Amino acid sequence: MSKPTDQQLPLRVVQITDCHLGKVAGSRLLNLDTDQSLAAVIELVRAQQPRIDVLLATGDLSDQGSTAAYRRFLSATRDLAEHTRWLPGNHDDPTVMRAALGADSRMQRNLVLGNWQIVMLDSSARGEVGGYLAAEELDALKLCLDAHPEHFVLICLHHQVEPVGCAWLDRQQVANSEQLWDVIKNYPQVRSVVSGHVHQRFDDLRHDVRVITSPSTCVQFAPNSDDFKVDNEMPGYRWFELHANGRICTGVERVSGFDYEIDLTATGY
Ligand SMILES: [Fe+2]
């Protein structure tokens, strides 16, 4: 069993999610150029975050699982952080993602840094919009948690594990999330579960575990809507400070002055 190191400073973590980059640069989602909005968010990250220990990219990095989209995402984020981890969403193709990265460490299962372990899970199910955690993912989580029992833990996956209050999105949450909670309840070192997919901020507590979701770098979805609804909030990202004593500080930042040409009347995407 490994002992945590004597972490001095909080770990600075940035989450970027749901970029939906198309096969070709400049592709649009609901009329929004998703490369352009990602670039605006990254510019904001660079301006606000002088030191990033970990960059977390939590899925739907591409819109159609294309190699070209992953290469563009890689080059846009390559030097942002000391460490980077990616995981797939329902719009991604994990095999293509891995191939695009080659020998790069970005799709490794976990990252152990200071007093913290970050564990990446794949909740994508081929051909499905909704999330599911296969037995291998839950087993891999247990292995990570058993391997580092004295580290605080942040679990990342694409789909949300609790309802966020939007009926249409909550039908797509991790279908077997209770199995995840059954694992988590045996490991009190787990401090937070962090997701993307819902294109909106959410922050709640379940069994003392912070359940968090974050804005997309492109189109935002309106909170508390039963049916598909686009929000006029700006693209953004989430930051975390992971403190040595297990405390988490977190917040959301959004771009401003961005020429937002989104189709707010859309009824689906
Ligand atoms: Fe998604």
Image (spheres, helix red, strand yellow):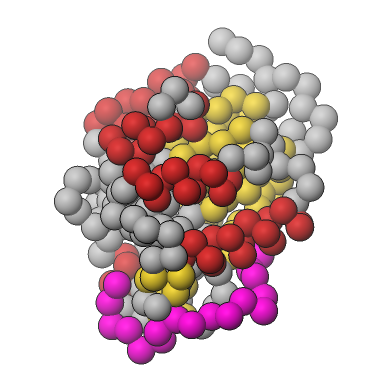
Q: Nearer the viewer, residue 169 or 25?
A: 25
Give the position of the N terminus as an image quadrant.
Answer: top right
Question: Residue shown at 68%/20% (left/top)?
Answer: 4
From the viewer's perspective, is 116 left or right of 260? Answer: right
Residue toward you, 167 or 236: 236
Residue 241 placement (x, y as % from top left): 71, 46
Please tell me whether residue 253 belongs to the stretch shown in magenta.
yes
Quarter-of-image position of residue 19: bottom left
**Residue at 39% over, 70% down:** 28
Q: Is residue 265 magenta?
A: yes
Residue 65 placement (x, y as % from top left)? 30, 49
- Quarter of the image for the C terminus: give it: bottom left
User: As displayed, is residue 39 above or below residue 187?
Assistant: below
Q: For this rendering, which residue is in front, 32 or 48?
A: 32
**Vertical position of residue 117 compared to residue 249: above or below:** above
What is the magenta segment's predominant secondary structure?
loop
Q: Is residue 167 left or right of residue 45?
A: left
Residue at 65% from the left image edge and 27% from the top image edge: 113
Q: Is residue 213 left or right of residue 95?
A: right
The structure residue drawn at horizontal position 49% and vertical position 62%, both measured from the top left corner, is 35
Q: Is residue 26 visible?
A: yes
Near-viewer residue (210 or 258):
258
User: How far across and how far down the image is residue 114, in percent?
Assistant: 69, 26
Question: Does residue 202 lie above or below 243 as drawn?
Answer: below
Q: Is residue 177 visible?
A: no
**Farthest residue, direction left:** 127
Identify the magenta region: 250-269
